[in-house]
Amino acid sequence: MVDRLVNSEANARRIEIVEQCFGSGQPLAVQGRVLVGEGVKKKYNKQHVIPLEEVKLESLDDEGHLRNGWLICTASKSFAVFAATSTEKHEWMAHIDKCIEDLLKKSGKKAAEEHAAVWVPDAEANVCMHCKRNQFTVLNRRINLNSKSESREKGFTESSGEDDSDDDEDNLNNRAGYYQSPDQ
């Protein structure tokens, strides 16, 4: 089926419609490219094309009103995506996984092994993720002083009230709280 769509007028129209949804940015229409899936998109932040060979998917368990979600993990940024129904979630995940598998097989590349942590928004981290006791306040937050690249490896927040007196440097680095900068 995909072979029939390559360079077809219908495929070009579908790609153009999706491209218009993203606004100005990187063009999606490329010779030989086929649009293999589409759905409703809500734009929350800057959008950019993510190379599929860098992507790893992880299913999220349903939690309260957050249902039918999965993680899209890349080396530079990882984030959650939610579908309207469980069926739609499974279809999207299966479709993306198949596209990744086909692309890796065709290119001979290996899947990326290192992926960025998913950031926990400040509004959702009410207590220290290390001790699970200390409540966060405006003053009781710990700010990461480590390098930005190291910050991406972590994904948790820790209170400033933690006792670091017996920590060695490596342990302290593994326990520091991290925040996403506004430009990410």
Image: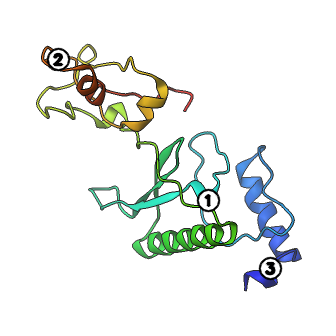
Q: CA gap, disc 3 to disc 1?
A: 20 Å
Q: Earlier in the sequence, mark 2 or mark 1?
A: 1
Judged left or right of residue 157, residue 116 is right
Circle 3 is placed at which residue position?
A: 5
Count up the numbered dots: 3
Residue 150, position in %: x, y? 43, 30
Q: Amino acid at mark 2?
A: Asp
Q: Is residue 153 above or below residue 109?
A: above
Please say if the residues under marks 2 and 3 sit with CB atoms less than 8 Å apart. Answer: no
Tell me the element at label 1.
helix
Front residue of 84/56: it is 56
Q: Earlier in the sequence, mark 3 or mark 1?
A: 3
Q: Amino acid at mark 1?
A: Leu
Q: Earlier in the sequence, mark 2 or mark 3?
A: 3
Q: Residues within 10 Å of mark 2 (few under 14, many from 20)?
A: few
Q: Can you tell which of label 2 and label 3 is closer to the viewer? A: 2
Residue 68, position in %: x, y? 39, 64
Circle 2 is placed at which residue position?
A: 164
Quadrant where the N terminus sits is bottom right
Q: Residues within 10 Å of mark 3 (few under 14, many from 20)?
A: some
Which dot marks residue 132? Answer: none
